[in-house]
Image (cartoon, grey):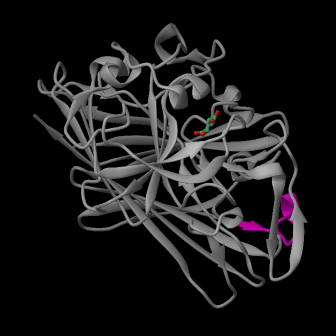
């Protein structure tokens, strides 16, 4: 089932699309191919929202924390906004201090995407499509991008497809902030996380990977055994002082159920599987009084992002995935969120 609400914001024609099956309901915007709400039942069958949502749709036009947005062409920071491809140096717009971040000043999160909805026997999907022109934000190549959200029983699946006519960078992700308590009744600190990752990337003071892979053993970054998230915040650890919380790239040792988050109070469990080699975990470390739904004001650690992707700034490091897409190659990545009750 689906429905569409038309909203005019200045000269922009925005659609708010609701899609649901028996277990899950999502709301999306064609602006930024953004996930606005994600409702799933708790242990008593009560459906509530498990991602951070702005009270007013108009706030998605700027959206500094990138709530629910599709990030492109590249997720995370590119050091100094510079990279070299096939001998040519490119300079991106620097919208993150001295760096470029999340696709530049006007990333894919600020574009109006075309879309179509496909209803099948056991699933319902929405496919968003955006054509990014050669040298948009100073990235080379015309890039045709598709982001497909599918509801299938107790799963939300996000698939990314892209093609280019010139060698370029491509690293697409979704930037939803999860909080399984439902309508964010409780901070994420009291929720549990396990992560199949043995190593994370060290960051320098500008939040760019130094190129060093650190073993998680004996650090607060060790989530190999399930633990309450607060345990990691309570630790004195320079890497987390730098970022005011979690804002790090973890290399995944296993694709299947790589991330598990549980809220024992509501009984909600989310398992994330992905084809991407890593995930950036960001714990909403710098809220800015965002006006959230249910009359709340966004505050530190109200939500946590699991941005499955290639390592940010990989193009500038020999030992990382560069996230380069060549003509005649098909970019295809898939991240699945499976919901159940514990
Ligand atoms: C990303 O890693 C980054 C953060 O540093 C940033 O501030 C946030 O998006 C909005 O996850």
Q: Which residues are magenta?
A: 131-139
Query: Is 266 left or right of 174, judged from the image as shown?
Result: left
Which residue is drawn at the image coordinates 69% and 87% (left, top)?
327
Q: Would residue 183 be visible to someone looking at this image?
A: no
What is the x, y in percent for residue 284?
53, 26
Reply yes or no: does residue 102 show up in magenta: no
Query: Quadrant location of ligand 1?
Result: top right
155 or 263: nearer the eye? 263
Q: Residue at x 50, y 74 (%)?
A: 332
Up/down of 48 relative to 96, above or below: above
Q: Is residue 13 left or right of residue 42?
A: right
**Quick one: 202 or 283, which is closer to the camera?**
202
Q: State the image quarter where residue 255 is shown.
A: bottom left
Q: Position of residue 17 (x, y in %)?
A: 52, 45
In the image, is 310 to the left or to the right of 2? Answer: right
The image position of residue 213, as x and y in percent, is 49, 53
Figure disc tally: 0
Q: Is 210 in front, or is 342?
A: 210
Q: Quadrant of residue 172?
A: bottom right
Find residue 183 and report its image quarter: top left
Identify the residue at horizontal 36%, vertical 34% (top origin): 219
As displayed, is residue 247 above or below residue 331?
Answer: above
Residue 272 appearing in the image: yes
Taking the spot 75% from the left edge, 81% from the top edge, the residue there is 167
Q: Quadrant of the C terminus?
A: top left
Asked if residue 319 is positioned above or below residue 20 in the image, the reply reads below
Residue 131, how many percent across, how many down?
74, 68
């Amino acid at each position: 089932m689906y429905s569409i609400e038309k909203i005019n914001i200045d000269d922009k024609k925005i659609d708010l699309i609701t899609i649901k099956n028996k277990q899950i309901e999502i709301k999306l915007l064609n602006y930024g191919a953004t996930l606005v709400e994600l409702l799933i039942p708790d242990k008593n069958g009560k459906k509530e929202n498990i991602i951070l949502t702005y009270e007013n749709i108009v706030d998605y036009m700027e959206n500094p924390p990138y709530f629910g947005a599709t990030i492109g062409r590249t997720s995370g920071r590119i050091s100094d906004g510079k990279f070299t491809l096939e001998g040519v140096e490119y300079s991106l717009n620097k919208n993150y201090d001295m760096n470029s971040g999340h696709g530049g000043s006007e990333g894919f999160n600020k574009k109006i995407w075309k879309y179509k909805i496909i209803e099948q026997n056991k699933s319902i999907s929405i496919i968003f499509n955006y054509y990014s022109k050669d040298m948009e934000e100073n990235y080379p190549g015309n890039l045709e991008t598709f982001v497909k959200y599918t509801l299938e029983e107790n799963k939300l699946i996000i698939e990314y497809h892209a093609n280019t006519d010139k060698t370029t960078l491509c690293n697409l992700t979704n930037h939803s902030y999860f909080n399984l308590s439902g309508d964010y009744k409780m901070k994420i600190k009291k929720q549990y996380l396990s992560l199949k990752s043995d190593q994370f990337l060290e960051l320098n003071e500008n939040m760019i990977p130094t190129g060093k892979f650190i073993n998680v053993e004996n650090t607060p970054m060790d989530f190999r055994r399930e633990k309450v998230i607060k345990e990691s915040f309570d630790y004195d650890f320079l890497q987390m002082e730098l970022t005011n919380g979690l804002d790090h790239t973890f290399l995944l040792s296993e694709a299947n159920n790589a991330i598990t988050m549980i809220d024992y109070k509501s009984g909600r469990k989310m398992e994330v599987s992905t084809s991407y080699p890593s995930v950036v975990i960001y714990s909403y470390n710098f809220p800015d009084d965002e006006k959230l739904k249910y009359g709340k004001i966004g505050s530190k650690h109200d939500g946590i992002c699991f941005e499955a992707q290639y390592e940010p700034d990989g193009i500038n490091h020999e030992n990382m995935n560069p996230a380069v897409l060549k003509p005649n190659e098909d970019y295809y990545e898939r991240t699945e969120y499976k919901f159940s009750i514990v």
